[in-house]
Amino acid sequence: MTRTRMTTVLLPILVVLGSMAVLLLLAGTNPWDPVRTIVEGSIGWPPFEGGSGRKVGDTFMLWVPIALASAGLIVTFNAGMWNIGIEGQIIMGAIAAAFVAREVSVSRPLLILLAILAGAAGGMLWGLLVGVLRTAGGVNEIFGGLGLDFVALSITTYLIIGPWARSGVASTSGTNPFPDDALLPSLGGSKLSPLAIAIAVVALLGVWMLFRGTLYGLKLKAVGRNRPSSFLMGIPTNRYLLGSFMICGALAGLAGTSQAIGFHHKLIPAISGNFGFLAILVVLLARFQPVWVAPISFFFAMIAVGSPGLSLRLDLHGSLGGVLQGVLVLSAMLGLGWAAYLARRRATAAAESSNE
Amino acid sequence: MSGFLNAFGQMFDTATIASIVAGASALMFATMGETISEKAGVINLSVDGSMMLAALAGFVVAFETDIVWLGFPAAAAVGVAVALLIAFANIKLSLNQVAVGFVLFALTTELSRFMGNSYVGRPPVAVPAWDIPGLSSIPFFGPVLFQHNLIVYLSYMTVIATYLFMYRTRKGLELQGIGERPEAAHARGILVNKLRYFYTALGGALIGIGGAAFSLDVKLGWSDRPTRNLGWIVLAIVIFGGWHPLRAAIGVLLFGALQAYAINLIPEFPSLSQVLPSIPFPAMILALVVVNWKALLKWLDRYPFLRAILRSDPPTAIGTPFEVD
């Protein structure tokens, strides 16, 4: 069973990657070049040996928000919710962490702890808001979330050109860098922060545990599969939906915190890096399995760090990486759908022949 | 306070109203397309991306051939292709429409950036202006409605045609039937899934034409992600409009008015010049939130007249595949 499922996922991906390679060949580019540029520009070539420590650190530090957001989305997806508001939750986490980093002055460990807690709380509140709109207001979470994404983005832009404007000229390039004390401690010469990595790993493990061995996770899944029957079985469905949004929001807020005090070291308008939407693709490709989220997130982080090199070296636009991600997820989805369709057809054919 | 009022006062000159009407064409087409598609039961969540890729296709074809009108069929073809993929994944493979739509949104957006990169900043091609003889000289209505170009006039006609088709023809009734009660439609001998393919494709074509209307008429030329977020607004307006073409058209004009108002506010609040243009996006979606608020709807139920105007119920079978047993 597992083997057939592996081939049904891998075969369409290989076919599509093959046809992309042919297209690149026709366009006069060696298809190996972009792959190598992305790997070389992120973890180095040969991997983890040839590259600069700075880039490897960047790759891991972008893995953190993608993995955190994906971990959160697994929770909301299992509850049957499309949390498109995750972008806003990442942004509000970043804003809350930035607030602590800018305005609070205590000893360094306490400051970082406070920033992390504030980030999680900021994302959680923004997630809760989507959930309240959904449960109390009957507003579809896709649109409530999208609206709150726009609101969060407007708040960031306002803060950056308004109250938190860079000293001297206000510009959309971002705030002043945060004080050194507020930044996540990192390994020398790179942004790689063991603390951030540890938080992301714990989050992934936690989500895996949640759906592997807890009653809460089981009930959440039941709510996602069939809300009316779960309600009749005595599960307070709305409370569980709100819970899933709060968990996802908190994890997204941590992703924003890592972006703010771990990667950019200041607040910028594009602080979310679009990683919320990217995480939706990760989770769809990982088929909601935390185990697969880790490697896929890492691959996507490599693309994020490595693809700017495409335009410098090969004169290909950096969005090729994004195209690759979209093609991967779409082909895996259609491949699985096609396999399931064939299985259904075989099953009905078998049922009909046994009837005769 | 007076700042808000000043900017509001400026909303009522003929030129501003005319520019709102002219600028609405792209959203009009796309909104009608999405309304038709959802009415048939298929949500095309990819609008934000497919409109963008279609806008690129329209511009590229018009630019390379130097014939502006050729851009529209090219853009429509892109919209149809994406829509058919969603319909196929949902109808044939029983995949989740929202998931496939979202992935296609991401993919088409990135494709438009990748393929459009070499067209950034190329000289624009524009739909030529054409005043309708006679009608354009009517005071007020002339400049507001009839001093634009063929694409803008076509956008009004599309709205009217969608409305008449949906609510005044037999085929339109079938369209509503396959989105509301596919089983009943099937029992009456209507080919539900075949029609769903057709109407999703038709909706996709209109979404594509909306994209071309943007790059060839509303904001000329190509830049990185020119139609960004407009597709999400389309999806919101369809709900805001309660899946009714005329109400959706009002939603489009309302969004245009909000945008014009935000621009008018900039001279009054220069310090917010970076934030104001983006305010209509959350404002529109929050308007949707209010309109859909359960408590408000309950209150509306007491006033049948208001309910008919404001309440919006989605097509019952929206988002669910229909399978013949």
Image (cartoon, rainbow, N blue to C red):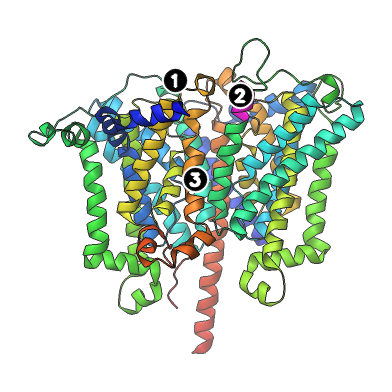
Where is mark 1, residue-wise? B267
Q: Chain of mark 2?
A: A
The residues tagged by marks 2 and 3 sit, at their Cα atoms, a distance apart of 33 Å
The stretch of residues the image draws in magenta is: A156-162
- Secondary structure at badge 1 equals loop
What residue is at 42 percent from the left and 52 percent from the top?
B240
Three-letter code for the amino acid on which mark 2 is drawn: Pro
* Residue situated furthest front in the rendering: B2
Callout 1 amino acid: Pro
Q: What residue lies at 59% left-to-right and 54% top-to-bottom?
A: A133
Using the image, tell me which numbered label, if any, was put on residue A102. Answer: none
The residue pinned by badge 2 equals A308
What residue is shown with label 3?
B285
Whether the magenta-drawn stretch holds residue A242 is answered as no
Residue at 91% across, 30% down = A109
Q: Position of residue B32 (x, y in %)?
A: 33, 50
Query: Vertical placement of A227 versus B216: above or below?
Result: below
**Disc 3: host chain:** B
Whole-Å distance between the Cαs marked 1 and 2? 38 Å
Instruction: Name the side, left or right, on which B159 lies relative to A54.
Output: left
The main secondary structure of the magenta stretch is helix
**Which residue is most to the top?**
A168
State which chain disc 1 sits on.
B
Specify the amino acid type for callout 3. Ile
* Image coords of residue B207 (percent x, y): 35, 45
Q: Is residue B207 visible?
A: no
* Residue plotted at (54% across, 20% down): B271
How crowded pointer 1 is (Cα within 10 Å; few <14, some 14-19, many 20+) is rated as few
* Distance of label 3 from label 1 (alpha carbons): 25 Å
Q: Is residue B234 above or below residue B37?
A: above
